[in-house]
Amino acid sequence: MVLSEQELDDILWENYYFLATTRVQAMEAMWGDLANGTLLAWALDSWGITSDDIVHSFTRIAESQLIGKDINEMAYEPTR
């Protein structure tokens, strides 16, 4: 199965934003996993996605999820 650009963006954003506290932390975690090789290993093994594909996805995600948004918005409201 081949992922479309939108499907890749959605998978990455949903997984990382859900696990992060804020939008910026989600982007930081994505770049960190790319830098340490875990994200690329998963992407290549699961979908045949290259590092260039991932970087392009990160750019699209940054444009759609950071520009004009509250970058400190939390993915979920913690229970108090």
Image (cartoon, rainbow, N blue to C red):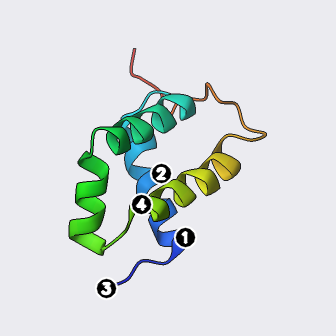
> Could you tell me which secondary element the residue under label 4 belongs to?
helix
Q: Which residue position is annotated with label 4? A: 11
The amino acid sitting under disc 1 is: Gln
Horizontal and vertical percent for residue 30? 42, 42
- Position of residue 12 relative to residue 4, above or below, is above
- Measured in 3D between alpha carbons, the distance from the residue under mark 2 to the one under mark 3, in whole angstroms, is 20 Å
Q: Quadrant of residue 45?
A: bottom left
- Position of residue 61 relative to residue 26, above or below, is below
Q: Which callout, 2 or 3, points at the residue further toward the start of the chain?
A: 3
Is residue 76 in view from this perspective? no
Say which quadrant the N terminus sits in. bottom left
Q: Which residue position is annotated with label 1? A: 6
Residue toward you, 60 or 72: 60
Horizontal and vertical percent for residue 26? 47, 36
Q: Which residue position is annotated with label 2? A: 13
| Residue found at x 33% / y 40% | 33
Name the residue furthest top. 80
